[in-house]
Image (cartoon, rainbow, N blue to C red):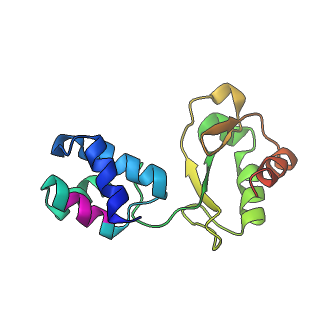
Amino acid sequence: MDNERIDQIIDKHHGEASSLIQVLLDIQSENNWLPKEALKRVGEKLHVPLTRIQHIATFYKAFSLVPKGRHGIHICMGTACHVRGAKRILDTIENMTGIKPGETDLEMKFSLETVNCLGCCALGPVMEIGGKTYGKMVPGEAADVLKNYE
């Protein structure tokens, strides 16, 4: 992400330090992660120390300081999903993508995460890809859904 685009995002928020989190969210939304160079630029433009920005970026789980894939896969491992076979869904996705939770594939296509709850327990087991929720999953359906993102 170039400095010109970062400056545009900052200007959209009127260059106010109070908009730091929203600026970081916008950068992450476009870039899928927060490169250190982007954090430095934000600090310079908003007059916020880099250490403060890094503290915020590491505190909130929504931010990533490492590259992420274009499609974020979240598998719910909460109680309702677990007892309905979430582990089998996770195994299927791991086998298809070749990655484990917390990893991103080499093509930067997928990042895989497990979560404790996606808030739709009656639909368990639940998988979310790029913000779209898929419920009552079975391994075969999970595989079919994933193929739509390749």
Residue 101 horizontal/vertical position (percent): 59, 61
Residue 110 horizontal/vertical position (percent): 64, 60
Prevailing secondary structure of the magenta residues: helix
Judging depth in this view, the residue of 8 and 60 nearest the camera is 8
Query: 114 left or right of 146?
Result: left
Res 124 visible:
yes
Residue 72 horizontal/vertical position (percent): 59, 52
Identify the residue at horizontal 17%, vertical 62% (top origin). 44
Res 61 visible:
no
Identify the residue at horizontal 71%, vertical 51% (top origin). 87
Asked if residue 39 lies in the magenta stretch, the reply is yes
Q: Residue 132 falls in which quadrant of the image?
A: top right
Q: As displayed, is residue 79 above or below residue 25?
A: above
Instruction: Give the residues in magenta.
Output: 38-43
In the rendered image, the residue lying farthest to the top is 122
Query: 127 left or right of 14?
Result: right
Q: As displayed, is residue 108 above or below residue 113?
A: below
> On the rendered image, what quadrant is the C terminus found in?
bottom right
